[in-house]
């Protein structure tokens, strides 16, 4: 894509990087074919190619408008377009830059502003969210059905009979909303890792990965969370621990991106790269193991919903399905597996109509083979999917843990 000189909205290093991304787009439009919002709305500006063009205009000096903001807001940041793009355009990075600049130029309605502030003030803080959650559960009976089901907490018992010591150890990210909504996910991960003689360490001062704030255009808050986690984890990595394991693919992607997002920060650049290099989704850890000690026993039929952050962001497409099949689980085929379920962080709260349509389509696809359980790899997707179906929706590691005898 030809560009005119970008105006001075970014510092020199970011300007050069952004210009290179814009030039790498050859305007072919292949990405529109796999973009969920373009498929729903059919408007060029609601597809990646059109959004790239909108961002280019703003960076060349044409002031952003509410229309620009609306089309960028509607993007799910699912990055399906990056998987499809033959030119390797770093759309996600460009979108972050575009949103940051547009946010500086265009104000928000009072309601939109208040919603964003509230979400940023509650969701990333584990204890605040736990209090909010108890409060919301109290009012759940008078909430609309689709919201009420989002406040259903999954049953969880802490794993017992763990080994007193392990041959290897890993750090595990606890996160922000997951310990309240589905504590069983990390309990299951701890149990399965224990069976493989891998012990788990939780860094007490680590918290939200930063994704929730970062993608709500509160980018400085997001960067603060990232620096806090880096400071919390580094002392452990410097000891005998090699990996930071995540059980929410959205958080895992964010941690893997710390190196890129903090590369212009002299004090954190190298530390952030070290943390990103150590980050692993739980499926990557298990895939590298022999697994002979697990011997799961199950006859349940599963349908796997591959979160966008796992398949497009972390590029781990097919890894969970392969692992579960290797362990003897029966997996149903799911049409259009590349499409987003509409969760996308806080998207289901900020863009409810579009999110609802994507969710309906996703549930229909997942239930095609009449599975007993829908499995996923990200807490946001799990809670979103469960709000629209009576089929149980669980993290795959919980289903695996339940199938592994003591
Ligand atoms: S597929 Fe890639 S190169 Fe083609 S329009 Fe989309 S982003 Fe640009
Ligand atoms: S990130 Fe997803 S919603 Fe956004 S432009 Fe790319 S494919 Fe479309």
Image (tube, grey):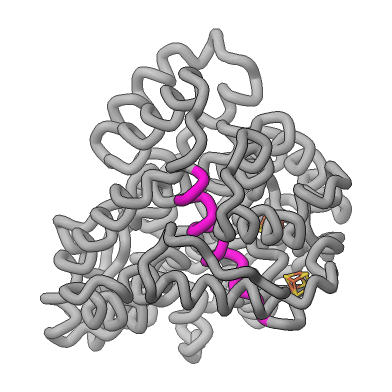
Q: Residue at x 34, y 65 (%)?
A: 190
The residue range painted magenta reads 88-102
Q: Nearer the viewer, residue 227 or 73?
A: 73
Q: Is residue 77 left or right of residue 360?
A: left
Which residue, as the protein is rendered here, is positioned at the far top?
A: 142
Which image quadrant is residue 132 in?
Answer: top left
Q: Where is residue 394? Give x, y as percent.
A: 57, 51
Q: Which quadrant contains ligand 2? A: bottom right
Q: Main secondary structure of the magenta part?
A: helix
Query: Can residue 370 be seen from the camera position used here?
Result: no
- The residue under the point 28% across, 61% down is 226
**Residue drawn at (36%, 57%) of the image:** 187
Where does the C terminus fall, quadrant-wise?
A: bottom left
Residue 5: x %, y % from top left: 56, 70
Q: Position of residue 318 (x, y in %)?
A: 68, 76
Seen at 76% across and 73% down, the residue is 84
**Is any part of residue 202 visible from this angle?**
yes
Task: Name the side, left or right, on which 214 lies relative to 59.
Answer: left
Q: Please identify the quadrant where the N terminus is shown.
A: bottom right
Q: Quadrant of residue 83?
A: bottom right
Q: Is residue 292 left or right of residue 191?
A: right
């Amino acid at each position: 894509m030809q560009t005119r000189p970008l105006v001075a909205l970014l510092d020199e290093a970011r300007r050069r990087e952004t210009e290179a991304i814009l030039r790498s787009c050859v305007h072919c439009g292949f990405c529109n074919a796999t973009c969920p919002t373009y498929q729903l709305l059919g408007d060029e500006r609601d597809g990646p190619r059109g959004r790239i063009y909108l961002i280019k205009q703003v960076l060349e000096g044409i002031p952003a408008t509410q229309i620009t903001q609306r089309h960028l807001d509607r993007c799910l940041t699912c990055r399906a377009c990056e998987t499809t793009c033959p030119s390797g355009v770093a759309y996600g990075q460009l979108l972050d830059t575009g949103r940051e600049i547009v946010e500086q130029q265009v104000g928000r309605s009072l309601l939109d502003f208040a919603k964003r502030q509230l979400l940023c003030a509650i969701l990333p803080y584990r204890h605040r969210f736990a209090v909010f959650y108890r409060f919301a559960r109290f009012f759940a009976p008078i909430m609309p059905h689709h919201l009420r089901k989002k406040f259903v907490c999954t049953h969880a018992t802490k794993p017992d009979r763990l080994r007193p010591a392990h041959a290897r150890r890993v750090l595990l990210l606890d996160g922000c909303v997951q310990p309240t909504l589905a504590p069983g996910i990390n309990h299951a991960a701890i149990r399965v890792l224990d069976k493989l003689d891998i012990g788990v360490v939780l860094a007490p001062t680590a918290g939200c990965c930063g994704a929730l704030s970062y993608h709500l255009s509160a980018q400085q808050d997001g960067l603060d969370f990232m620096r806090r986690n880096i400071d919390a984890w580094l002392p452990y990595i410097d000891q005998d621990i090699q990996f930071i394991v995540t059980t929410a693919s959205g958080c895992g992607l964010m941690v893997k991106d710390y190196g890129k997002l903090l590369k212009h920060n002299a004090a954190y650049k190298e530390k952030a790269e070290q943390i990103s290099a150590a980050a692993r989704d739980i499926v990557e850890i298990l895939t590298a193991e022999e697994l002979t000690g697990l011997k799961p026993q199950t006859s349940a039929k599963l349908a796997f919903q591959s979160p966008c952050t796992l398949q497009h962001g972390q590029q781990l497409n097919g890894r969970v399905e392969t692992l579960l099949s290797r362990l003897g689980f029966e997996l149903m085929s799911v049409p259009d597996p590349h499409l987003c379920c509409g969760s996308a962080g806080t998207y289901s709260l900020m863009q409810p109509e579009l999110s609802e349509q994507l969710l309906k389509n996703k549930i229909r696809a997942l239930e095609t083979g009449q599975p007993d359980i829908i499995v996923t790899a990200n807490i946001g997707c799990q809670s979103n999917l469960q709000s629209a179906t009576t089929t149980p929706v669980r993290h795959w590691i919980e289903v695996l843990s339940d199938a592994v005898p003591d």
